[in-house]
Amino acid sequence: MTPTMPKSVADRVFDTLQQQILSLELPPNTRISEAEVAARLGASRQPVREAFRRLANLGFLNIRPQSGTTVTLISEEAVLKSRFIRIALETQTCRAACRDIADDGLAILASLISQQRQAITDGDRQKFHILDDQFHRQICVSADVGFAWDIISDHKAHMDRVRMLSLDTSSQNRALDEHIAILAAITARDPDGAAHAMTAHLTRIETLIAQLKQESHNWFTDDSN
């Protein structure tokens, strides 16, 4: 087994800032500076500059030398592209899981659903978000296509900001019900049913965007036309 290489300072800065952006700890339009981030994270300016460039390339930072760096608005176009990629991949991972998942894989998925239910009871929105990701990842792993989750992870980040913004108790309960439906179809070895349940689950992001824009968060940019 190939040993995992330790992360560079730039990697650690990138991971920290990306998580803060996705969790909305750094909401859209927040101004940040290399000097401030370097001081806060105990890093030199060069790795911070590298992390800024990577985040800008992914569409999460606007770097303007004359006016400073800000966290981008949520791109509706980027969210919908991410949704397309997730549906394409995750409907297929569900089909593969219906064929290949073992009993222990089903047990892990059931446990994750139980933990999600407890996170809702505890009012722990961040934990629910983490468990949500673990549920989707576990489907890939149980179907022996764990590599698919690596691809999904690279493209789902724009959806994550919408998910965190919308994760009230009602939304969490609905997501939980959708996860239960996905697991039921996989347990029944029903590939069409599982693919349909996953598609319905991931498509709901469009409704969430519409609702959030109506609430005047002013955190979205409509660049889909």
Image (cartoon, grey):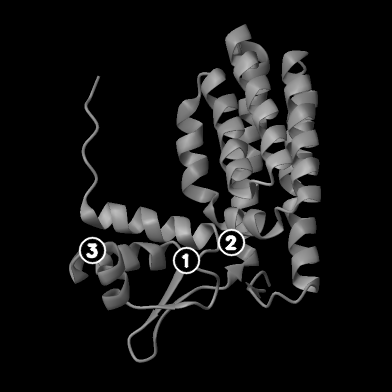
Kindly identify the residue that appears in the image at 66 percent across and 41 percent down: 87
Foreground: 224 or 161?
161
Q: Quadrant of the C terminus?
A: bottom right
Residue 125 visible here: yes
Q: Which residue is mark 3?
A: 42
Tag shown at residue 78:
2
Dot 1: within a 10 Å radius of its alpha carbon, few (fewer than 14), some, or many (20 or more) residues? Answer: some
- Could you tell me how far apart the alpha carbons at marks 1 and 2 are, in whole angstroms? 9 Å
- Could you tell me how far apart the alpha carbons at marks 2 and 3 are, in whole angstroms? 32 Å
- Could you tell me how far apart the alpha carbons at marks 1 and 3 are, in whole angstroms? 25 Å
Q: Of the residues under marks 1 and 2, which one precedes in the sequence? A: 1
**Quadrant of the image occupied by residue 93:** top right
Q: Which residue is mark 1?
A: 59
Which amino acid type is shown beneath numbered disc 1? Gly
Kindly identify the residue that appears in the image at 51 percent across and 19 percent down: 144
Kindly identify the residue that appears in the image at 78 percent across and 13 percent down: 188
